[in-house]
């Protein structure tokens, strides 16, 4: 209780966070999954078929991948994050049912996946650098900055994901990225510039926004 009063987030104190009906293991310093990211899960599930190749970039604790696995659709799943503490958590959460890799975005993925990814999901950091100081202390002081900081306009990491995604997507494959409602139009323009046909999905209930798109 003393640690909670001092500002320590509840989830790492408990050791888990609730997400998509699952208990996601969370360790100190690792990004805590937000309920709004369940929109990313539901949009991905609507696209999945048996045996599909799925990549979860910027996977954090592996919450999205764990949720996808929970739906009992047999998929070939890869999760990647630049933060070793996050991928250690993700490995515990997926429990050997997927491949967890540590590295900078696509650099960690096996080259054999190029042109084979049916669903590519990314909850890349999208908080503008200047806005981090306005975030609640639970996030600002207790989560890795690399999981929050999206650069001057919040789109730096998303820009890189969108630029490289077409080389990894299969014919008919789809990229899905969580973003803010304010940033969605700019992200959709990035999709178009990379040859992807975007659509913006919004959930008022979850206060969540996803931009999704496949190759034209």
Image (cartoon, rainbow, N blue to C red):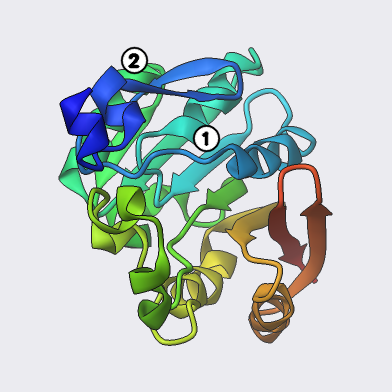
The foreground one among 166 and 201 is 201
Q: Nearer the viewer, residue 105 or 41?
A: 41
Residue pointed to by mark 2: 95
Q: Residue at x 60, y 24 (%)?
A: 20
Res. 27 visible in picture: no
Q: Quadrant of residue 125?
A: bottom left
Give percent across and percent down for residue 97. Answer: 41, 17
Tell me if mark 1 has few (under 14), some (14-19) or many (20+) residues whose alpha carbon lies within 10 angstroms of its own.
many
Give the label, 2 or 1, closer to the camera: 1
Viewer can see residue 92: yes
Mark 2 vs 1, N-terminal side = 1
Image spot of residue 212 (x, y percent):
73, 59
- Quarter of the picture containing the N terminus is top left
Q: Quadrant of the C terminus?
A: bottom right
Provide residue 137's location: percent of width, then percent of height.
31, 54
- Left or right of residue 90, residue 212 in this image: right
* The disc label shown at residue 64, or none: 1
Characterize the local packing of mark 2: few (<14), some (14-19) or many (20 or more) Cα atoms within 10 angstroms.
few
Residue 199 placement (x, y as % from top left): 82, 65
Task: Report the side of 10 relative to 41 (left or right).
Answer: left
């Amino acid at each position: 209780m003393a640690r909670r009063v001092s500002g320590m987030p509840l989830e790492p104190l408990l050791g888990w966070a609730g997400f998509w009906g699952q208990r996601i293991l969370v360790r100190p310093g690792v990004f805590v999954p937000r309920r709004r990211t369940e929109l990313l899960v539901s949009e991905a599930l609507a696209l999945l078929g048996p045996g599909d190749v799925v990549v979860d970039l910027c996977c954090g604790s592996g919450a999205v991948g764990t949720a996808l696995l929970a739906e009992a659709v047999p998929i070939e799943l890869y999760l990647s994050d630049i933060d070793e503490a996050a991928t250690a958590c993700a490995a515990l959460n997926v429990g050997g049912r997927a491949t967890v890799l540590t590295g900078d975005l696509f650099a960690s993925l096996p080259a054999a996946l190029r042109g084979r990814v049916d669903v590519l999901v990314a909850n890349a950091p999208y908080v503008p650098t200047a806005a981090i100081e306005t975030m609640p202390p639970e996030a600002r002081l207790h989560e890795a900055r690399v999981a929050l900081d999206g650069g001057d306009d919040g789109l730096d990491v998303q820009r890189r994901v969108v630029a490289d995604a077409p080389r990894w997507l299969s014919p008919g494959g789809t990229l899905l990225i969580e973003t803010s409602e304010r940033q969605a139009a700019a992200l959709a323009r990035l999709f178009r510039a990379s040859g992807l046909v975007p659509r913006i999905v919004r959930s008022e209930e979850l206060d969540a926004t996803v931009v999704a798109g496949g190759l034209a």
